[in-house]
């Protein structure tokens, strides 16, 4: 990749970065409270985590919508996530947790003493927290993709929602503190958005099925289910129907 192309990529990426207003408020509180260094260090760990998601998304040519800097980290929005190959999406999700291994070695090299202990603790906390099976954390996204690879698409999404709500309630019960209210509130907001997203996504996905061009292996169903990653066929009244012929029926089944 030549220098001009790299500069253009960085410019395009810069234009897609947005800072949430609460993040600026956190900066002010951290500065006034005398813990700006510690806050920025934690934010830096989470941002490095998100950068690894970004690099993997770039590698697989995902469409970057925006990157939002939140008070407790960053969030990468991809326009075509859940519309690409499941294994590529899994790679993008796993890039974040794997980044903490490299962050661990970097902390060992560039820091020492109490500051090093703090960074180690935060690195482990961010790693463990993101693995919780709550959407949209990495654990929740990976769980969703794993379920989509083995069961009906609609059932996988709703199962992800149910597990996410259950684990969220446990988190709320055992970890509700004043300094975690924003994170807990953000996760609740995301779960509500995810519930709304499921039905919008299914309508968009089923509507786009005929335009998908890939080498998916065939799979035959005797009932109305849809498996991502496969070219779905349906055996109805001893007749084999292609998924393209079933779009209307699949769309009608979304709210059932």
Image: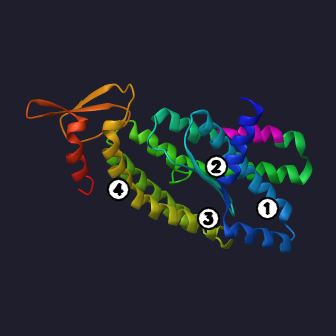
Q: Quadrant of the N terminus?
A: top right
* Viewer-closest of 204 and 175: 204
- The residue at the point 45 percent across, 45 percent down is 144
- The residue at the point 38 percent across, 31 percent down is 213
| Residue at which label 1 appears | 39
Mostly what secondary structure, the magenta segment?
helix
Q: Which residues are magenta?
A: 96-106
Q: Nearer the viewer, mark 1 or mark 4?
A: 4
User: In this image, 31 relative to 13: left or right?
Assistant: right
Label 2 element class:
helix
Disc on the earlier residue, 1 or 4: 1
Label at residue 183: 3
Label at residue 199: 4
The residue furthest front is 4
| Quarter-of-image position of residue 52 | top right
Q: Could you tell me residue 171's position as x and y percent?
A: 55, 62
**Pointer 1 and pointer 3: residues touching (CB < 8 Å)?**
no
Label at residue 128: 2
- The residue at the point 61 percent across, 33 percent down is 59
Disc on the earlier residue, 1 or 2: 1
């Amino acid at each position: 990749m030549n220098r001009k192309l790299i500069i253009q990529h960085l410019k395009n990426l810069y234009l897609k970065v947005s800072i949430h207003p609460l993040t600026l408020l956190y900066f002010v509180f951290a500065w006034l409270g005398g813990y700006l260094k510690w806050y920025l260090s934690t934010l830096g760990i989470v941002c490095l985590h998100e950068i690894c998601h970004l690099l993997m998304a770039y590698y697989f040519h995902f469409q970057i919508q925006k990157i939002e800097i939140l008070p407790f980290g960053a969030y990468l929005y991809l326009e075509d996530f859940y519309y690409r190959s499941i294994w590529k999406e899994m790679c993008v999700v796993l890039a974040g947790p794997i980044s903490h291994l490299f962050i661990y070695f970097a902390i060992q090299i560039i820091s020492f003493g109490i500051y090093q202990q703090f960074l180690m603790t935060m690195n482990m906390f961010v790693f463990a927290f993101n693995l919780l099976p709550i959407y949209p954390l990495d654990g929740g996204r990976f769980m969703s993709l794993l379920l989509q690879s083995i069961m009906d698409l609609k059932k996988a999404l709703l199962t992800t929602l149910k597990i996410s709500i259950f684990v969220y309630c446990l988190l709320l019960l055992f970890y509700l503190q004043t300094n975690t209210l924003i994170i807990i509130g953000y996760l609740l907001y995301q779960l509500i958005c995810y519930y709304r997203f499921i039905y919008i996504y299914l309508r968009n996905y089923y509507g786009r099925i005929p335009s998908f061009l890939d080498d998916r292996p065939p799979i035959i169903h005797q009932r109305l289910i849809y498996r991502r990653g496969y070219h779905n066929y349906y055996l109805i009244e001893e007749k084999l129907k292609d998924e393209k012929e079933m779009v209307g029926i699949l769309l009608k089944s979304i709210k059932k």
